[in-house]
Image (cartoon, helix red, strand yellow):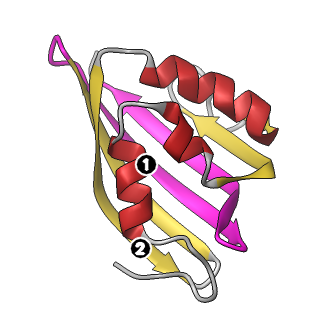
Amino acid sequence: MGIAADSAFDTETLRRAVESRSPEPLLSLYADDAELRIVDRTSQPSHPKVLHGRDEIARMLEDVYSRDMSHTLERCVVQGDQAAYSESCEYRDGVRVLSESMLSLRDGKITEQTLVQAWDE
C-alpha cells in the first residue's frame, strides 16, 4: 500500500470511501471532469459503458450504494499518478460481485477509471 506523490489519495482514504454506506465519500475522490469506463457482462470491452463527469458518476454511485450490500477494499496499489484496486461486494442474499479498477490521478483526484466487474449468476 502506498501514497501517491504530492496528493491526498491514499489507500486508507480509498478504503474508508469504498466501505462507507454512502456514495458521497467515494464521489469526493473524483475530479469534476473524471471519466469512468465499465466493462462487464452487459457492457463488453468493445462497447464499455462510459460515464463522463461527477454528475453521471454520482448517479451510478447513488444506485450502487442504495442496495443492501457490503463493500470491501481487498487490496490497493498507488504509484505516483496511477492506482489499482480490487473490491469485493456481497448482497444480503449471498450474491457476490468482484471488481478490479485501474485509476489515473491528478492532484489527488481520480481522473480516469476503468472498472471490470463480474457477478455470481
Q: Residues within 10 Å of mark 1 (few under 14, many from 20)?
A: many
Q: Position of residue 28 (x, y in %)?
A: 62, 49
The three-letter amino acid code for the residue at tag 2 is: Val
Asked which quadrant contains residue 102, the reply is: bottom right
Asked which quadrant contains residue 53, the reply is: top right
Q: What's the magenta region?
A: 92-119
What secondary structure do most residues of the magenta stretch adopt? strand
The three-letter amino acid code for the residue at tag 1 is: Ala
Magenta stretch containing residue 47, yes or no? no
Visible residue check, residue 12: yes
2 on left or right of 53: left
Q: Foreground: 3 or 46?
A: 3
N-terminal-most mark, 1 or 2: 1
9 on left or right of 70: right
Visible residue check, residue 48: no
Q: Secondary structure at mark 1?
A: helix
Q: Secondary structure at mark 2?
A: strand
Residue name at image x 68 percent, y 34 percent: 57
